[in-house]
């Protein structure tokens, strides 16, 4: 500790080492009067209290982010880490990496989120991933701010029923989408779209398939393609590893697709073990497929469709044909899917409405 005289007062300064970063920091206290032994004792006690109360580097949002990503590196797949890093890095920039976790409030987080130029649907995605990080911090004892686990999701402009309806295509919409691809000779996207509609595969699962994985009776799903890190990895969950039964219409589509693919590969002079591939024989670029689906669907259907919409459409078509929710969950590789159940309830409601329409003008006697 050292002192500095200032206009009848004395300023006492002490250095200390941050135990996390190892960096030198300092605190100070100013007392009236000269530098006397009594004042030095008082100043020494006050400085010790100040140092004890200083937020350590581990209490900051930036430190929590680094710890959380390091933890995820050891526990989750690379694709999940990449997705979380992008979202959480943006939140750290938004809230400030030096923000002290104990001082963060729900109101502050919400106000910062509202300053972002995006929809509430996107903001809710940020809330979801940020709350997971805050909960990790609580579990690991990095902070004790339980309020951060209560950040509410923001209202979205559409009702829940409308949002569910947007998760899948009606049969006529699916046909319209396929007809567009066919009429514009976009055969690669046509076949991928139809196979997904008829199988319920995730896009990463389809892209990762080797030709030998597609047999006469079953598609053996045991891996997925990570487009961010450009690697083939294990399936999303243990229930995702499964055999998907090949029904008649799917078998016919696979047969037609393989004929087209053989001609395409011969034309481009390639040989590849992949079931679907680019013209150079490498893995299909997921983002190209998704971008094409979005642009075409917005143009001809008036709403955006993603590869996951095709998966939910498969579920809705099975539901409409009397297949049970449990059977569909097993086919899709879900342990317990709330989305599938929501789609089920919505489709069931629509079927009831159609039944009522049939009965409305029916003369039984």
Image (cartoon, grey):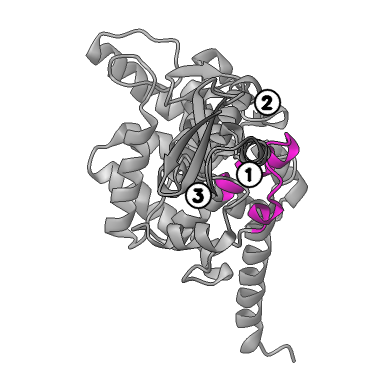
Compared with 235, 94 (above or below) is below
Vertical side of 19 occupied by 200: above or below: below
| Local crowd size for mark 1, using a 10 Å CA cut-off: few (<14), some (14–19), many (≥20) | many
Q: Quadrant of the N terminus?
A: top right
Q: Residue 221 is drawn in which quadrant?
A: top right
In space, the residues marked 2 and 3 are separated at their CA atoms by 29 Å
Residue 189: name its quadrant.
Answer: top left
Q: Nearer the viewer, mark 1 or mark 2?
A: 1
Alpha-carbon span between mark 1 and mark 2? 31 Å
Q: Residue at x 68, y 38 (%)?
A: 45
- The quadrant of the image that shows the C terminus is bottom right
Q: What kind of element bears circle 2? A: loop
- If you read the primary sequence from the N terminus, does the residue marked by circle 2 or circle 3 appear first? 3
Q: Nearer the viewer, residue 105 or 298?
A: 105
- The label shown at residue 302 is none
Secondary element type, mark 1: helix
Q: Which residue is mark 3?
A: 126
Q: Is residue 39 visible?
A: yes
The residue beneath circle 2 is: 241
Which residue lies under the disc numbered 1? 134
Q: Residue at x 41, y 48 (%)?
A: 94
Magenta stretch secondary structure, dominant: helix
- Which quadrant would residue 240 be assigned to in this image? top right
User: Does the stretch in magenta take in 134?
Assistant: yes
């Amino acid at each position: 500790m050292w002192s500095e005289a200032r206009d009848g007062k004395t300023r006492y300064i002490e250095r200390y080492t941050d135990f996390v970063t190892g960096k030198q920091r300092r605190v100070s206290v100013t007392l009236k009067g000269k530098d006397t032994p009594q004042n030095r004792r008082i100043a020494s006690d006050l400085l010790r209290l100040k140092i004890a109360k200083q937020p350590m580097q581990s209490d900051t949002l930036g430190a929590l982010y680094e710890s959380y990503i390091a933890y995820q590196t050891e526990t989750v797949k690379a694709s999940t880490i990449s997705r979380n890093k992008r979202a959480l890095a943006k939140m750290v920039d938004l809230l400030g990496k030096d923000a002290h976790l104990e001082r963060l409030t729900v109101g502050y987080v919400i106000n910062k989120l509202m300053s972002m130029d995006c929809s509430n649907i996107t903001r809710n995605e940020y809330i979801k991933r940020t709350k997971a990080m805050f909960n990790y911090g609580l579990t690991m004892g990095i902070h004790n701010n339980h309020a951060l686990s209560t950040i509410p999701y923001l209202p979205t402009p559409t009702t829940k029923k409308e949002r569910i309806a947007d998760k899948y295509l009606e049969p006529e919409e699916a046909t319209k989408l396929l007809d567009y691809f066919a009429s514009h000779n976009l055969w690669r996207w046509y076949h991928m779209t139809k196979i997904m509609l008829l199988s319920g595969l995730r896009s990463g699962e389809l892209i990762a398939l080797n030709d030998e994985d597609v047999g006469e009776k079953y598609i053996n799903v045991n891996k997925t393609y990570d487009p961010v890190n450009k690697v083939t990895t294990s399936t999303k969950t243990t229930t995702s590893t499964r055999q998907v039964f090949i029904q008649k219409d799917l078998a016919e589509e696979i047969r037609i697709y393989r004929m087209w693919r053989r001609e395409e590969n011969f034309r481009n002079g390639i040989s590849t073990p992949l079931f679907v591939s680019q013209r150079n024989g490498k893995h299909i670029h997921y983002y190209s497929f998704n971008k094409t689906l979005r642009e075409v669907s917005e143009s001809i259907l008036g709403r955006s469709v993603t590869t996951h919409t095709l998966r939910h459409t498969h579920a809705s078509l099975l539901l409409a044909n009397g297949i049970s929710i449990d059977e569909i969950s097993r086919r899709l590789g879900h342990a317990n899917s709330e989305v599938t159940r929501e789609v089920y309830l919505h489709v069931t409601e629509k079927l009831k409405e159609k039944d009522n329409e049939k009965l409305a003008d029916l003369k039984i006697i």
